[in-house]
Amino acid sequence: MGLVAFTKREKIVELVDKNPIVKWARAKSPWMLTFGLACCAIEMMTAGTSRFDATERFGMLPRASPRQADVMIVAGWVTKKMAPRIKRLYEQMPEPKWVIAMGECAISGGPWFDSYNIVMGVDKIIPVDVYVPGCPARPEALVDGIIKLRRKIME
Amino acid sequence: MVEEKEVEKKEEEVKEDKPKVELKDELLDELKEKFPGAIIETRVQRKRRLVAVVDKESLVEVCEYLRDSLDFDHLSSVSGVDYEDRYEVVYHLWSYSKKKLITLRVKLSKRAPSLQSVTSIWKSADWHEREAYDLFGIRFKGHPNLTRILLDDDFKGHPFRKDYPLVETPLFNEEK
């Protein structure tokens, strides 16, 4: 970007985050925090099975704890009761982190666009990198979304 | 061709000969005898499906009698209904020994719907009544923990009422 790195932290960021080898490593093994909330969770599970193999062949190991995850796949609708918990889980993930919003409900509220208890899209709470449309999103669509996320990580 | 004609004949016979049979059940008669004022009307839907509209004041008595003497030991569900002029609470009771399902309906006013809780009789009524309170606003007297169960604790309003507006509401009801 042409800026001079003054502090040590900025030098580290330049050395590490923009290093093509580090970016390659991060893109090839994004560990996911599966946030399956509703029907898209079923599709995410089938995408992880042997027929589509969306997750394991891209290096996406499922981790239960947010402290060990890089990518959070929000699959399903987010209720207002769940919203502060999602925010807290997102804040618990260490940098660098990305979010995939899977399914119509996570993108924009889906069929519950005029509901009293659903958050209209998870991007009202956390920043989203990749949107995977569909109701439910087909496993192939999730594979497409993961490939796009890998390209985004590689910049 | 022959089969079609036979089927048509059978349909015609059925339509002509079907008399209106009023199904009776001795269980409902027993209930009406024991609680003459409390049971407002009864109906037998099918062979093992009974319906009884019960007065609000004597609901607990009737339920205790049903559980103790008539073996209705399983409360399947408690649900609320919102009609034009009243609320109703519907109890579905199942008897394992007799294999009968009885539906009790209690009519409540729209102003301040409140009812005695049956948690002391069947423990499973606990969460069902909390759901009816959460979504309809029906208060149950004597309930051990009448708080919201499905919605957020500080949610304002009761969404399943027919006059709840269905519009997109802001993200949080209060700023968090």
Image (cartoon, coloured by chain):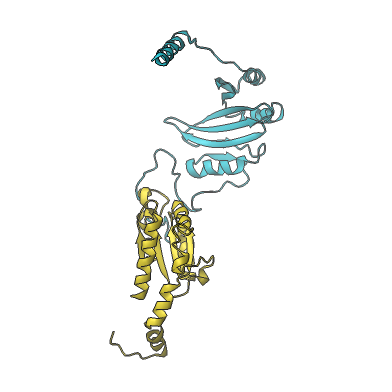
Chain colours: A yellow, B cyan
Indicate the quadrant where residue A99 lies: bottom left
Q: Which residue lies furthest to the right in this view?
A: B69
Residue depicted at x 30% and y 87%: A3
Residue depicted at x 40% and y 51%: A136
Indicate the quadrant where residue A25 lies: bottom left
Answer yes or no: is residue B89 visible.
yes
Residue B9: percent from left, percent from top:
42, 10
Residue B120: percent from left, percent from top:
67, 39
Q: Nearer the viewer, residue A59 or B123?
A: A59
Q: Residue furthest left?
A: A2
Residue depicted at x 39% and y 87%: A15
Answer yes or no: is residue A96 visible.
no
Residue depicted at x 47% and y 62%: A86
Q: In which quarter of the image is the C terminus of chain A?
A: bottom left
Q: Quadrant of the N terminus of chain A?
A: bottom left
Residue A35: percent from left, percent from top:
48, 60
Indicate the quadrant where residue B97 lies: top right
Placement of B75 over or under B144, stated as above or below: above
Residue B130: percent from left, percent from top:
56, 44
B75 left or right of A14?
A: right
Q: Residue furthest top?
A: B17
Q: Nearer the viewer, residue A143 or B17?
A: A143
- Count of residue discs: 0
